[in-house]
Amino acid sequence: MFVGDGRRRLRSTRLSTSLPAPVTLNRPLGIQLLAALLTIYTMAGFLLAMRMLIERDDRYRWWLIVAAAVAFALASGVATLGVWRVEKRAPLLLVACGALGSALCLALPAAVPDEALAPGMWRAAIQGAVLIFAFLALAAWYVRNVVRARARA
């Protein structure tokens, strides 16, 4: 059912033809790149959890990997939001994400039966755990400095 000829609606839309103001991000490039990397960590954690949950290979303790992957993905997601918003709690969230990432690295060989473990698998898992924790601890230091600089400005 038509009421009127629509000219009034057309006139009201003509007024809003001006272009929106350009949006500038005032986040440092390091913060943007760190948030992007944490987003990838989040997606990878959920993808690993979904794959292990779908396959449910009884040769492995798949539930251990699912639990560690979901915990890491949630921690990464929360840390991503904290870093993107440049929150004061972001460094602590990054350290927690690093701890859960290290736990995921150690959960992978722990989920494999002892007779199926390849030589050096635990050593590689420990090295990966140390590296991910060290990287995210360094990132926490960087974010802490950015947060402090913003508080002073």
Image: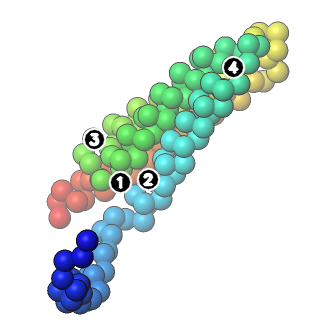
Q: CA distance from mark 4 to mark 3?
A: 36 Å
Label 1 element class: helix
Q: CA distance from mark 4 to mark 2?
A: 31 Å
Question: Picture coordinates of residue 57 (x, y %)?
Answer: 73, 18
Q: Do residues under tags 1 and 2 come within 8 Å of each other at their CB atoms?
A: yes
Residue on which the image places disc 4: 56
Residue on which the image places disc 2: 35
Q: CA distance from mark 1 to mark 4?
A: 35 Å
Residue at 78%, 24% (x, y): give it: 120
Neighbor class of circle 4 (other Cα within 10 Å; few <14, some 14-19, many 20+) is some
Name the residue nearer the viewer: 136 or 63.
63
Residue on which the image places disc 1: 84
Question: Picture coordinates of residue 103 (x, y %)?
Answer: 54, 24
Foreground tag (4 vs 2): 4
Residue type at mark 2: give it: Ala
Q: Is residue 53 above or below residue 73?
A: above
Q: Is residue 41 left or right of residue 82?
A: right
- Which quarter of the figure has residue 116? top right
Name the residue nearer the viewer: 60 or 92.
60
Which disc number belongs to residue 89?
A: 3
Residue at 27%, 82% (x, y): give it: 20
Name the residue nearer the viewer: 70 or 15.
15
Q: CA distance from mark 2 to mark 3?
A: 14 Å
Q: Is residue 38 above or below residue 114?
A: below
